[in-house]
Image (cartoon, helix red, strand yellow):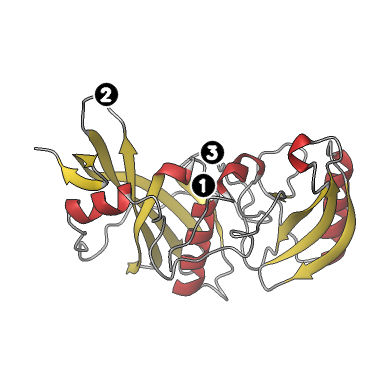
Amino acid sequence: MKTSHQVLLPLIALFAAACGGSGSAESTKPAATPAATAPQLPSDADIATKAYDPDYFVPDGFFADLRADTVGSYTIHHVLDSSQSYELCSDDLVEAQAWEEADNASRAVNGYFVTSIETDRYFEFVRELSYTQDVGNATTPTSPGFARVFKCEHTNRDGVDRNLPDGYAGRIDPAVLSGTRLRDFTEYLWQFAWFNVSHKKVIESRSGTTPGSLRQTLLLAFVNNQGAGACDRIDVVEWHFDANAESGEIWRRLEVHHSFEATLESGVARLCD
């Protein structure tokens, strides 16, 4: 499966990523601990092929959010607190709905309530938004809007600075923390990352462990144009997410593994000398 984010990506600026609640960004950051055995990376040729493939975004089996393939004009956002500094979370439906109602009332385009959806990860509120004055919605004057409040039990993002690629990333309740939950957490956040992911590709998503923690690593390819007539520089980047097995706190670290030059000739990736 190749997951398309073409519909989702233009809305990243409106979307605020995961959630928040009772975690602590004041916690002492653990020292970086390398994996016991360095994994074998794909060849530069394989990385370049995927980096230039317009239909490739993420590997097979990558977590895709329910709304990633929603068709049509819509908005997706998480409900933020008034400071806009971090995402809120709640395990109480009444509290979550009150936040969403206040958020809807404060928006330039308000919607009428349609329904609410509850999963093990979040509360979602669906509204029909009216865009009668919007040229882009001339034939369909209304479109669905989705607002989410994540459950603190699942993902707590209190105190997270989502504009930074490194540092505290949130907390998963250690009672439910597992490699699968950390993988889903990491891959979900990628879809709404602090950088525009439209020109970044996930080459691999791999799970592992370090002493006392679980680790999920996204192997990324960033294509950097170096000007007319020059080969592109492709940065091979590892984004590590380490979850402490006892506290459930997650720390992220972005590092460049290596770089190489490549170009696209007649639709085929070629490494430069």
User: 192 or 133: which is nearer to us?
Assistant: 133
Q: Is residue 192 visible?
A: yes
Q: Residue at x 76, y 66 (%)?
A: 91
Percent of width and height locating residue 89 = 71, 57
The residue tagged 1 is 193
User: 40 or 86: which is nearer to us?
Assistant: 40
* Marks 2, 3: nearer the viewer: 2
Amino acid bearing label 3: Asn
Amino acid bearing label 2: Ala
Please, is residue 80 above or below residue 249 in the view? Answer: above
User: 8 or 29: which is nearer to us?
Assistant: 8
Cα–Cα span, label 2 and label 3: 31 Å
Q: Tell me the tag on residue 228.
A: 2
Q: Residue at x 61, y 50 (%)?
A: 17
Cα–Cα span, label 3 and label 1: 8 Å
Amino acid bearing label 1: Ala
Q: Based on the displayed image, in which of its 4 quarters is residue 70 positioned? A: bottom right
- Mark 3 residue element: loop
* Marks 3, 1: nearer the viewer: 1
Q: Is residue 228 left or right of residue 214?
A: left
Q: Tell me the tag on residue 163.
A: 3
Q: Are marks 1 and 2 in contact (CB under 8 Å)?
A: no
